[in-house]
Image (spheres, rainbow, N blue to C red):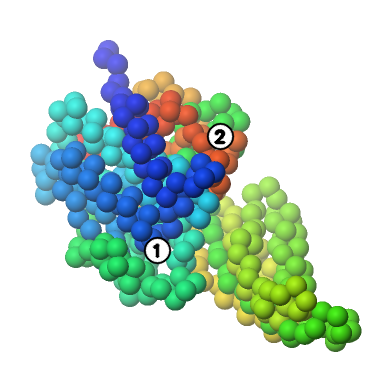
């Protein structure tokens, strides 16, 4: 029997290293916040490569990119595959970029093999997956799936009050194509695991069954800014002390629902942030996650109760605003099976896994059969400049993507 098709691993690695030069940080990572000049530069490079690979590129109203490789029956709903190019402020080279460039490598390989698929294939770059500059995360795939309105998506603002719509205009990626509403036959996303499981078990491929639930909350605590030296303890209304107690409570809520529960306070801003002023106001973010919706709800309620208790005890005014809820997502059994068949055909050690991280595939799963492919990342580290993968795993994951996409594109 002929050896199964595989991608050109060297070409894929070259593309990953070239893309990693855009927004490169001194410590080996990337900073490509959504819709910044670095994101535009990355998009421009992708568009050039996609056109060189014979694709027609379209841009939709949320700036999502679609690089289309025609099929024999080009009127049929396409198979989509891709990920994101925006990163965290101190992100790694591979979060998102791997899925985009593995998908491009699939197209390049099909070109090399002169393989014409029945259905068209579209490589997709989703705008603002990270949700770091503009919250919530996965906003553009969410608009594509009808989870959010276009107006809501375009009106999301960063901390400086600049909107997604303004930035899309500024970088020249406010496209004419309607965002969503087009039929999709299937969607596959290749991504690094961003956790320790595959590496610890010596598995090359994660067959992703779904994504855990996520809740994001914006919190504000208001007390009284006052003199650090003259204000007696009973008179202090210290917003930062209150935030510290809420942060401790968040850690205890996660421990109470171990081992799956996750709670994170990633952003914290102190006002007036002066060493000899009792903080009068603190703004901070809560990120809560769990694979089961009811447990995630219980975690949120427990933490809200702690928040209210701290406000009462510390005589603080509190604002608790839930800004995003993404329920746990189950992927399509047939697409999952296609990924598993591809891994077995390629003789790659694999295991089923639930994604701890959110991905655009979460929203694609609401509009078409969807699944994901994971590869290991070193020490399970991600959202860190030291994020690393091996060229061999990168190629293996892209070859699994090739076979899964091909299976669906021939249906
Ligand atoms: O937050 C997440 O899980 C993803 O990396 N945006
Ligand atoms: Mn990602
Ligand atoms: Mn990420």
Badge 1, how many Cα within 10 Å: few under 14, some, many 20+? many
Based on the displayed image, in which of its 4 quarters is residue 321 positioned?
Answer: bottom right
- Left of 71 or right of it: where is 87? right
Position of 213 relative to 122 (above/below): below
Badge 2, how many Cα within 10 Å: few under 14, some, many 20+? some
Q: Please tell me how many numbered marks the rendered image carries.
A: 2
| View extreme (top): residue | 1
- Left of 362 or right of it: where is 72? left
Does residue 287 appear in the picture of this structure? Answer: yes
- Left of 335 or right of it: where is 358? right
Residue that mark 2 sits on: 378
Position of 140 relative to 203 (above/below): below
| Residue at 66% over, 77% down | 271
Based on the displayed image, in which of its 4 quarters is residue 281 positioned?
Answer: bottom right
- In the rendered image, residue 408, in percent from the top left (x then y), is placed at 26, 39
In the rendering, which numbered label is found on residue 376? none
Residue that mark 1 sits on: 139
């Amino acid at each position: 029997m002929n050896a199964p098709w595989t991608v050109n691993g060297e070409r894929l690695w070259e593309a990953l290293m070239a893309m990693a030069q855009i927004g490169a940080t001194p410590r080996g990572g990337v900073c490509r916040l959504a819709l910044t000049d670095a994101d535009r530069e990355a998009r421009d490079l992708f568009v050039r490569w996609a056109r060189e690979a014979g694709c027609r590129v379209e841009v939709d109203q949320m700036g999502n990119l679609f690089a289309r490789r025609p099929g024999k029956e080009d009127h049929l709903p396409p198979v989509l595959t891709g990920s994101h190019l925006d990163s965290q402020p101190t992100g790694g080279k591979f979060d998102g970029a791997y899925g985009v460039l593995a998908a491009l490598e699939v197209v390049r390989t099909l070109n090399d093999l002169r393989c014409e698929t029945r259905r068209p294939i579209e490589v997709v770059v989703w705008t603002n997956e990270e949700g770091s500059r503009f919250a919530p995360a996965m906003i553009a795939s969410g608009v594509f799936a009808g989870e959010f309105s276009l107006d809501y998506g375009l009106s999301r603002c960063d901390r400086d009050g600049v909107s997604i719509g303004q930035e899309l205009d500024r970088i020249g990626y406010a496209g004419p194509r309607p965002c969503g509403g087009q039929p999709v036959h299937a969607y596959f996303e290749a991504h690094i695991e961003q956790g320790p499981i595959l590496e610890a078990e010596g598995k090359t491929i994660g067959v992703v069954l779904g994504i855990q639930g996520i809740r994001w909350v914006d919190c504000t605590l208001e007390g009284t800014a006052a003199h650090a030296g003259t204000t007696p303890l009973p008179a202090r209304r210290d917003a930062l002390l209150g935030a510290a107690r809420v942060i401790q409570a968040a850690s205890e809520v996660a421990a109470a629902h171990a081992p799956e529960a996750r709670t994170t306070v990633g952003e914290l801003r102190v006002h007036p942030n002066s060493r000899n002023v009792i903080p009068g106001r603190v703004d901070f973010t809560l990120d809560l996650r769990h694979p089961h919706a009811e447990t995630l709800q219980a975690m949120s309620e427990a933490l809200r109760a702690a928040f209210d208790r701290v406000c009462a005890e510390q005589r603080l005014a509190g604002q608790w605003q839930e800004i995003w809820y993404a329920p746990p997502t189950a992927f399509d059994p047939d697409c999952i099976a296609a990924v598993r068949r591809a891994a077995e055909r390629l003789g790659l050690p694999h295991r089923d896994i639930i994604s701890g991280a959110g991905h655009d595939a979460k929203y694609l799963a609401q509009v078409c059969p969807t699944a994901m492919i994971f590869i290991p990342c070193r020490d399970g580290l991600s959202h860190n400049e030291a994020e690393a993968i091996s060229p061999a795993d990168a190629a293996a994951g892209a070859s699994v993507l090739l076979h899964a996409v091909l299976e669906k594109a021939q249906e």
